[in-house]
Amino acid sequence: MPIAYWCILVAALLPLMLVGYAKSSSKDNNTPRDSAENLAGAKRRAYAAHQNAYENFPFFAVSVLAALNFGASPGTVSGLALLYIAFRLIYSWLYIADKPSLRSAAYAGGLFANIAIFVLPAFR
């Protein structure tokens, strides 16, 4: 199984890791979404990174599946998928650390890696 498929799993679990950190001090499990409004600082930014990870996941998963199903090189797709995951991890860390300019650059890197995955079959 290509590494790119494992990257889909990592990308799917990333939002859960981020929200786990964001809500690690919360005692409210009755209305957990309501307690997000009370988060501040790094925890609030981690929650925002969690939401952004969910927003970006569908495009990444579809890109990997489409590229592999339309004949792109599994090695190239896997390399770009690993690059995407690296950018997303860096993005999340920079979001939590409150480094907005660097965070935007990491976001762009991940987006471009994802676009590259999507268009790979057109260049085979």
Image (cartoon, rainbow, N blue to C red):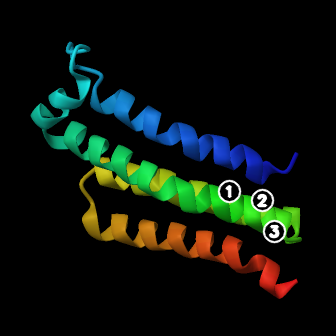
Q: Residue 58 carries which label?
A: none
- Left or right placement of residue 89 versus residue 45 in this view: right
- Left or right placement of residue 34 versus residue 104 in this view: left
Q: Residue drawn at (69%, 71%), measured in percent from left and top?
A: 117
Q: Residue drawn at (45%, 33%), measured in percent from left and top?
A: 17
Q: Which residue in the structure is indicated by mark 2?
A: 78
Where does residue 54 sit, x and y in percent of width and height?
A: 44, 49
Q: Is mark 2 on a helix, strand or loop?
A: helix
Q: Which residue in the structure is indicated by mark 3?
A: 76
Assess whether mark 3 and mark 2 are in contact (beta carbons under 8 angstroms): yes
Assess whether mark 3 and mark 1 are in contact (beta carbons under 8 angstroms): no
Check the image and report above or below for 48 versus 64: above
Where does residue 118 sit, x and y in percent of width and height?
A: 68, 73
Q: Which residue in the structure is indicated by mark 1?
A: 82
Q: What element carries label 3?
A: helix
Q: Residue drawn at (52%, 60%), measured in percent from left and top?
A: 87
- Closest to the observer, 36 or 70: 70
